[in-house]
Amino acid sequence: MYALASQSSGGSWVLLIIVYAVIFGGFWFIFIRPQKKEQKRVQAMISEMEVGDTVLTTSGFYGVIIDISEEDVIVEFGSNRNCRIPMQKAAIAQVEKVSAE
């Protein structure tokens, strides 16, 4: 009788470990995997930026890139060409490439 009880107890531990593994796998697919894909997309977007591209900043401003350094970009805002602001590349939310005409 004791041997039967210990076997069912051992089986419940295996089942518990399997359930935890399934839950962890579900969290990975739902939360971690999409976040890593988004980080790769943003890194690719930032690395492909060029002078003349139109950008949208994280604060909602549209501008044109006029200079790129290792960690920063200089963005020109407005139509009067007098507003040039240096900012970190991480502050760029979206890049629109210059269309070749």
Image (cartoon, rainbow, N blue to C red):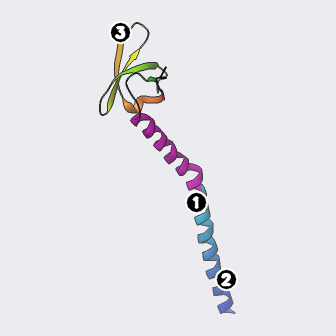
The answer to whether residue 59 is left or right of residue 25 is left
Q: Residue 82 bears which disc, if any?
A: 3
- Answer above or below: position of 44 versus 15: above
Q: Classify the position of the N terminus by image quarter.
A: bottom right
Label whose residue precedes the other's in the sequence (3 or 1): 1
Q: Position of residue 87 (x, y in %)?
A: 35, 25
Residue 77, by quadrant, is top left
Q: Residue 96 bears which disc, if any?
A: none
Residue at image point 47% right, 19% down: 61
- Answer above or below: position of 79 versus 51: above
Residue beneath disc 1 = 25
Cα gap from disc 2 to disc 3, whole angstroms: 77 Å
**Magenta part of the chain:** 27-49
Label whose residue precedes the other's in the sequence (2 or 3): 2
| Three-letter code for the amino acid on which mark 3 is drawn | Asn
Cα gap from disc 3 to disc 1, whole angstroms: 52 Å
Q: Residue 8 bears which disc, if any?
A: 2
The answer to whether residue 29 is left or right of residue 50 is right
Mark 1, Cα crowd under 10 Å, few <14 / some 14-19 / many 20+, is: few
Q: Position of residue 89 (x, y in %)?
A: 38, 31
Cα gap from disc 2 to disc 1, whole angstroms: 26 Å
Label whose residue precedes the other's in the sequence (2 or 1): 2
- Which residue, as the protein is rendered here, is positioned at the far front? 101
| Three-letter code for the amino acid on which mark 1 is drawn | Gly
Residue closest to the eye, 21 or 73:
73
Residue contact between numbered discs 2 and 1, judged by CB atoms under 8 Å: no
Mark 2 vs mark 1, foreground winner is 1
Residue contact between numbered discs 3 and 1, judged by CB atoms under 8 Å: no
Residue closest to the eye, 20 or 35:
35
